[in-house]
Every structure is written in structure tokens, then in C-alpha cells.
Image (cartoon, rainbow, N blue to C red):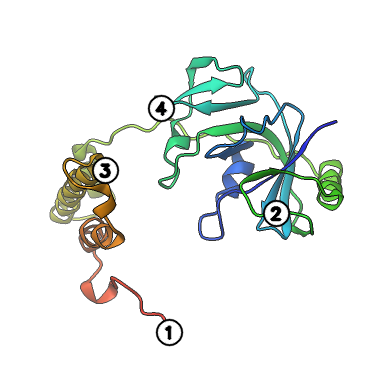
Amino acid sequence: MPTYWQISAGSDQRDYSDLFLKYGIAFVGGGLEEKNVNLGDIMVLKQGKRAIKAAGIVVERDGIYRGYVDEEGYVVDEEGRENREMRREWLLDHDGWVLPEFCYVDWKKPSKPIPVRGLNIGTIQRINKQKPKDVADDILDTRRIIDPSTEPSETREVDYDDLLNFLIKEGLRPSSSDEITITISKIRLLADYYYNQYGYPWEDLGEHEIRTFLVIPLLLALGWSEQQIKIELKCKG
């Protein structure tokens, strides 16, 4: 008998469930290997703890059904074997989050999320209550598999001359294009300084520094005026 798992894809503010469905995959920061998710198990993609967005069966593709991405971006399969021909770097920096563990899933999706009781808070947990299992079974019996799209390709560093030429071809004035390129160069240098902690204590870096020295300069270079920008938005209460 397959094991039923509930899995979440971020939160209301950072929801990447569309990527689960688009690429036929489920990925998390950790837990798939520890909880021993297996081939043929049933994944239930939940919305909060009150609805099911999709359900699917863990399947094998390219000789692997579950694995993780190591620090170099290579895929390591469920047996601990590194595949030097398979890379998945995009899971190491998804909106700033490291989400290296994954499994392949043939997802099926209802027309809208189905309300259900019996789900819990948490990234991935075994489902013990019958009602969510029944809803998942109904989705699997009545919906068609979503054909997975090709995953994002490996990123490459963009040369500043390429960026400058692209902006000019898009119709931006050469002087404005040059200003944006120079600003991005400065932002990258400072971001590298922050990220690699060259004598800068990471715990001392706050949102104020990021907004003021990384985000605001880019917005100004892109044409935003100071009148259009708020450092903080006051909330009533």
C-alpha cells in the first residue's frame, strides 16, 4: 500500500506550487529522504491546512525518483550516487531559499482547491486521516496527468556589454542604459560583500541596509522617482 504524504509549497506570501505542477516535481528544504518517501507513494499538495490543490503519484524519471542537489549543483539519487550528467542548480537558490531535496510526481489537479479537514501545518507529513486520502484518490481517479515542462536551464553570468547592448536594442537611451549597467555593477559588488561576509558580520545586516543600498539604487536607475518610493509603509493599528 502506498503512503500518503501532505506537502506544502511555501506560504501565502511565497507560494511556488505552480512550479511543482509545471515541472512535475516536489521540492523541499529537507525531509523527503528522512521520512523515506518511496516510489509509488501519493503526494497531496495542500493549501494551508484546509484545502487540497493537487495530488500525484511519485514516479521515476531518468532512472531516479527521489534525490537531492549537492553544493555543486549535481543531482544525487536515492541510493546516494552522484550523477555528473544531471544538474539542478535552480533548487539551490529559489527566491533566496535552498530547497535541494526533490521527488518526481505525476500531478493531477482539480479545477479549484478542494476544502478538506484532516491536514496539518508543516512542510511534509504523513497523512493518517481518511478524508484527505479519499479526496486525493478522487483526484487521481478523475483528473488527467499534467504533462511536465522542461525545467529551468543552468544559469550563466551576463556580461555587462551584453546587458548594455540589450537595453539599447530595447529602445533605452545609451546614457540611461549605461547608468543602469553601472548601478547593477555597484549593487553586485556590495551584495557580494554582504553575502561573503568580508569582515561584515552577517547578523548585523538587516532589511534596512538591503532596501537602502541594494533595492532603492536599482529602482532609481530604472526610472522611479523618489516621490514614488517608500522605505517603509505605515500601517494603521
Task: Decide if residue 145 is on the left or right side of residue 98.
Answer: right
> What residue is pinned by disc 2?
120
Q: Between marks 4 and 1, how big is the CA–CA gap?
A: 44 Å
Task: Decide if residue 138 is on the left or right side of residue 106.
Answer: right
Q: Please, what secondary structure does the residue beneath circle 1 have?
A: loop
Label 2 near label 4: C-beta < 8 Å? no
User: How many residues crowd around disc 3 within 10 Å: few (fewer than 14), some, or many (20 or more)?
Assistant: few
The label shown at residue 189 is none
Is residue 222 shown above or below 125?
below
Q: Between marks 3 and 2, how big is the CA–CA gap?
A: 35 Å
User: Where is residue 86 shown, x and y percent of the image?
Assistant: 50, 20
> What residue is pinned by disc 3?
195
Task: Decide if residue 87 is on the left or right side of residue 158.
Answer: right
Is residue 33 shown above or below 16?
above
User: How many residues crowd around disc 4 within 10 Å: few (fewer than 14), some, or many (20 or more)?
Assistant: few
Q: Between marks 3 and 4, how big is the CA–CA gap?
A: 16 Å
Label 4 near label 3: C-beta < 8 Å? no
Between discs 3 and 2, the one toward the N terminus: 2
- Camera-side mark, 1 or 2: 2
The label shown at residue 236 is 1
- Camera-side mark, 4 or 2: 2
Q: Please, what secondary structure does the residue beneath circle 2 have?
A: loop
Please state which amino acid type lies under the numbered disc 4.
Answer: Glu
In the foreground, 154 or 104: 104
The label shown at residue 71 is 4
Task: Decide if residue 108 is on the left or right side of residue 177.
Answer: right
| Residue sitting at x 54%, y 14% | 81
* Residue 150 visible in the snapshot: no
